[in-house]
Amino acid sequence: GAPMKALIIDGQNNHDWKTTTPALKQILEETGLFTVDVATSPPAKGDMSTFKPDFAVYRVIISNYNGEPWSKETQDAFEKFVREGGGFVSIHAADNSFPEWKAYNEMIGVGGWGNRNEKSGPYLRLRDGKWVHDTTPGTGASHGAQHAFLVQTREPAHPIMRGLPAEWLHSKDELYDRLRGPAKHVTVLASALATRETRGSGEHEPLLMVISFGKGRVFHTALGHAMEAIRCVGFATTLQRGTEWAATGSVTQKVSANFPTADKVSLRP
Ligand code: ZN
């Protein structure tokens, strides 16, 4: 069929969005499944009332945005888009955005920083093989030193994960830990151990998740701090598959032979 229309949102981020957005766009377009537009917001302290992407013409929205609140009108339009069945993909610091926007936090499941704490919701913690809510008071997010780390599949039968190895070595990235939020309707697809040695939480941290919000599907990847992480074949593959799943509810892509293994990072050119 014809490629699906996808939209990346950027314009404000404490990360280098001017470099990463073109890379994300290429990763998505090379699947042949998507044509990707980019909506760039005004810079910080700009007139956000002018930022009004036409969400309704897209199948899936991908956020590379971490910045000031959008207008009420734009927030309402985005919420309506997802609630009525649109796909949404949150990349890395996009889950830092909008700590005060209730529906957005329900879409991402858990998020970080922005004064998030126990009032934002629980941590997701792996206990006896199940992800449970931990309401212990405390910080909403941190990360240790950047490093390559082992990503472990938790839902091998989910369409996004089918055919991927049980464990794979992700190239150097920030390993977000202690994210917290409403954590409703979340399925954790993959996690990684944030070791104490790297100043992490000592817990298995959810890093790839899917969330249902109304009729909409959300894919949340906490990976992707900078280009070394985005060039990881594991990051790119899960982004491609997660975006297709968010758009359609199924995944038709094959897993490439150069996918990383448990002991070897694999970078795209
Ligand atoms: Zn980062």
Image (cartoon, rainbow, N blue to C red):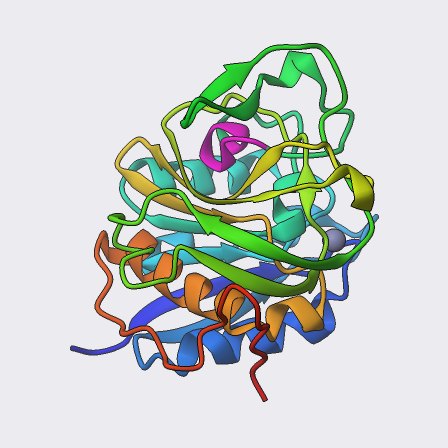
Vertical side of 212 occupied by 64: above or below: below
Residue 74 belongs to the span the image colors magenta: no
The residue at the point 21 percent across, 78 percent down is 2
The residue at the point 58 percent across, 55 percent down is 150
Does residue 70 appear in the picture of this structure?
A: no
Vertical side of 238 occupied by 158: above or below: above
Residue ranking furthest to the front: 263
Q: Quarter of the image containing the C terminus?
A: bottom right
Direction from residue 76 to residue 101 in the image, left or right: right
Q: How many marks?
A: 0
The residue at the point 59 percent across, 77 percent down is 23
- Using the image as rendered, state which of residue 102 and residue 127 is in the foreground: 127
- Which contiguous range is marked in magenta? 104-110
Res 228 → quadrant: bottom right
Q: Position of residue 254 (x, y in %)?
A: 27, 74
Direction from residue 95 to residue 130 in the image, left or right: left
Direction from residue 78 to residue 241 in the image, left or right: left
Vertical side of 29 occupied by 67: above or below: above
Res 80 → quadrant: top left
- Using the image as rendered, state which of residue 84 and residue 160 is in the foreground: 160
